[in-house]
Amino acid sequence: MNKYARKIFGKGKKGRKSKDGPSAEGGDGYDDSGFVIAGLPKEGSHDEEDGEPMETSSESTVQGLNSIFKWLSLKDTDECRKQNQKTASKKALPKYNILLLGGSGAGKSTTINSFANYEKYPTIKDAVKNKFVELISSSFKLAHPETDEEFCIESGHDANESDILGQSRTKDPMAYRFTFADKIIRLIDTPGMGDARGLKADKENFEKILEYLKNYETLHGIIIMMKSNETLNSTAFNYCITELFSRLHRSASENIFFCFTFSRNTFYRAGDGFYLLNQVLNEEFPDAKLELKSKVNCFFIDNEAYRYLVAKKAGYPFETDQMAEFAVAWNKSADQTRQMFSRIIEKSPHNLLHTFKLNMAQNFIAELAEPIVRLQKNIFSNMNTIERQKQSIERDSSTIDELKKTMHMTIFDMKMVVLEAPNTVCASNKCREIVLVNGVRKVDLKKCCIACPVEDIPTRKKGELLLKYCEIFNKNGNISNNCRECGCSWKVHLHVKHEYQPVQKKVIDPVVEKELKSLLDSKKSSDCISRKIIEALENTVRELNEEMEHIQRAAACFGYLLNKHSNSSCNQFIEPHLDMLIEEEKMKIKFIKGYSDETLMMLVSLKDKHGEHVKKIEKVIADGYSMELEDIDKLAHELCQLKHSGQQFQTLVNQFLKDNEKKVAHVERVGLDMSGNQ
């Protein structure tokens, strides 16, 4: 195993480095407090054996553990190119992949149609005289100029386009390949955000886009399209921007462009939409450091000239002098479109593997967040139980029979049970009750929907908007704010995918227990046996304490990695789960006579400890040690190897890998071939 695959955490004496010290080849990074991250390489470090850069491939695994990135086996399939090799240039042409994103009705599909015509015909007159290019079907309505009656205009039929009012016209992502003499431009059309079916449909569409992109290795451009005169900071608009920037790797910011459609209304300059977008980016995503600049990353078009071509073909009676107006729109929009694509082609491509890894890491860490908190709570409770027993032995003269009972004392492990389907539960005070399970008091939440069919709702997070699509709020399309089962607001409901059951286990290790039994059989004094039992209990407490520290450090590393690679701050990813457990402990204190507040105080302190660990990691990294998303594999492996909590983490990892095994479909169409090789 090379040094890059060694343990993330090691043990070292306070204030000193390892015996050999950190070197250019990698090593253990310490700060003055003794905080250590073992096996992290210095920037630019190399493997000792072959002198090559250390492997950071998504295919790598850590002994016995499949990589959480194992499904990211990426290659550019480009099936169209394989099927049309005769039309391709003998010399491989550079390919530029450009993704179009935006709200439903922003004009993504129309822009692709328009681009094809701008490139094929110099003027709108040429497009009218000849057969203009129709890549994607069109459907819209105009009022008849004389009768004001509805004039329906339809052009072509496309199984990938929907005619249902309010829904995104484009059903699934689709690439359109434009071949020129010196390059290939691939425009990827996508379903629009703001679908009339609500956020559930938007989320499904966004997942489709991310899955489709796994067919490609790079993106040169990500074009966010919105109406130039957009004034409403709507839920759909916010979702589109927030989802995009939270999912994209920070390095993709350089490849983001903004295209404002319907710009005739704003004289092909910045309008209300520009200033609304600028405000949202500055307030919500300052880390993205995106400055909007005309002709740099912002462009203004109006594709009404293409709609004119479609309507004219359908027999709509335009007035003779109207073509001049559409000619202006054609010329300005063609010029802006070419400028935008020229800027995009100049950019170094964004490596999509970085974004895919970030998304996989985000999903994986989200799954670990709650168990990380609950396991620490359980460890703390067990440590207190053992400590009290140890003090009792030290304080009192125990008989042999009493010591025998201590030998067999038990604590509680937290067994995690993965549900076949998520449940929707209510976390309001009136829907909680304290129940006794295997001798342990726990707070039980009312199950309002068992095996909820709504997918992709973040677990253990109250008030997720997608919860409104659960049948307890949504009956035949009529959405209620209150649950039909318990009457409480949707804002206090949440999805759960796991349940936790206390399971008894012996405190003293079987090997030590055998030694103690031998001492008892030899009729040693109770003092001698007491010392041996105390030693065993102290050893277990020490192991549990080290595990809790290890879990805290792993959580800090997860937070650091997300914050480093994402456009939004992610350090507080465990906070919602801490808050949930804090509420549960307060309830126990209120209703259980004599219940201690020790666990409550520990949970409150965890928030501060998490921040302290993140700062320590940042200091170690500042000293030149590297930590990347691939290290999540090693962190997960270390958690799975923990003596007392490892099995719970292994269950989570296995379930995550199972849930994320997906096959990606790839569909691509020939958009336009102007290479001269037809």
Image (cartoon, rainbow, N blue to C red):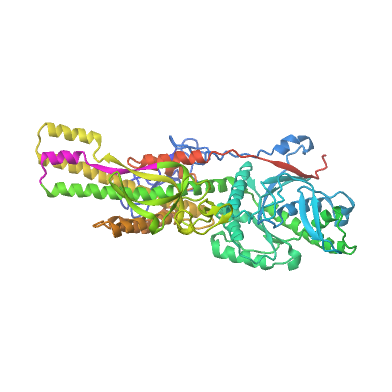
Return the x and y of residue 348 as percentages of the image width and height: 64, 51
At 33% from the left edge and 59% from the top edge, which residue is drawn?
586
Q: Quadrant of residue 636?
A: top left
Q: Is residue 477 visible?
A: yes
Image quarter in which the C terminus is found? top right
Q: With 151 as the anchor, is 290 left or right in this view?
A: left
**Front position in the image: 255 or 386:** 386
**Front position in the image: 295 or 659:** 659
Q: With 627 as the anchor, is 158 left or right in this view?
A: right
Return the x and y of residue 295 as percentages of the image width and height: 71, 62
Return the x and y of residue 369 as percentages of the image width and height: 43, 50
Reply yes or no: does residue 593 show up in magenta: no
Reply yes or no: does residue 398 show up in magenta: yes
User: Magenta segment range?
Assistant: 397-416
At 89% from the left edge and 63% from the top edge, which residue is drawn?
319
Return the x and y of residue 271 as percentages of the image width and height: 69, 68
**Front position in the image: 355 or 449:** 449
Image quarter in which the N terminus is found? top left
Q: How many marks?
A: 0
Q: Quadrant of residue 329?
A: bottom right
At 41% from the left edge and 50% from the top edge, which residue is drawn?
370
At 74% from the left edge and 54% from the top edge, which residue is drawn?
111
Q: Is residue 29 visible?
A: no
Q: Is residue 485 above or below residue 283?
A: above
Q: With 290 as the anchor, is 449 left or right in this view?
A: left
